[in-house]
Image (cartoon, rainbow, N blue to C red):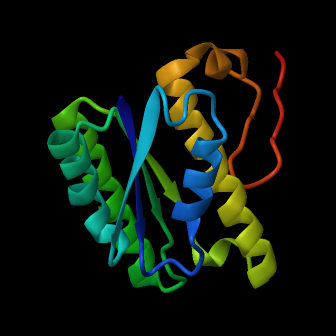
Amino acid sequence: MDLIGVVDTMFARYDMGAEAIDELKQCPGFGSTFDVVRRTVPGFKDLAVACKRLIEGEGCLIVVALGMPGKADIDQVCAHEASQGLMQAQLMTSTHILEVFVHENEEEDPAKLAVVCVNRARKHARNAYWMLYEPEQLTRQAGQGVRQGYEDAGPISA
């Protein structure tokens, strides 16, 4: 059976891992074609190693990495470094790791921020599924200004 990895953090203020897993459980083939493996790490700087271990040690075909950088400038710098680590892990393993960061400074209202967390986690989980099993779904949406977390921006024309 194929495996899709979900790695999330304790630092996040919303359980995006549970949202991603719930979305994957709604996809065709869950439990028969693929299953989900979840790991939780302390913070987003720990995501890259956890993702790499899921790929190399447990055979995950794709991983969704979820994190929530704080509002402080140092958090934004650390998020950039964590992002670089995730990109390096992808290159080292030749496996997609979908980075799903929701920055605390994206929304002041905690309720609105929670909606962004839900939307982004679920849409990227679905993207991971599509990348493995229905890539034509992604191709259909090419150039359409599709966003994860907020309303779609829509296409532009020449």
Q: State whether residue 156 is above or below residue 53.
A: above
Residue positioned most to the bottom: 72
Expressed as whole percent of the image width and height from the top left, the position of residue 27 reads: 63, 34
Expressed as whole percent of the image width and height from the top left, the position of residue 144 reads: 77, 26
* The quadrant where residue 116 appears: bottom right
Q: Is residue 65 visible?
A: yes
Looking at the figure, which quarter contains the C terminus? top right
141 relative position to 52: left or right = right
* The quadrant where residue 97 appears: top left
Q: Is residue 88 visible?
A: no
11 relative position to 107: left or right = left
Residue positioned most to the front: 32
Q: Nearer the viewer, residue 77 or 125?
A: 125
Q: Residue at x 25, y 58 (%)?
A: 50
Q: Residue at x 62, y 59 (%)?
A: 19
Q: State whether residue 67 is above or below residue 73.
A: above
Expressed as whole percent of the image width and height from the top left, the position of residue 20 reads: 57, 53
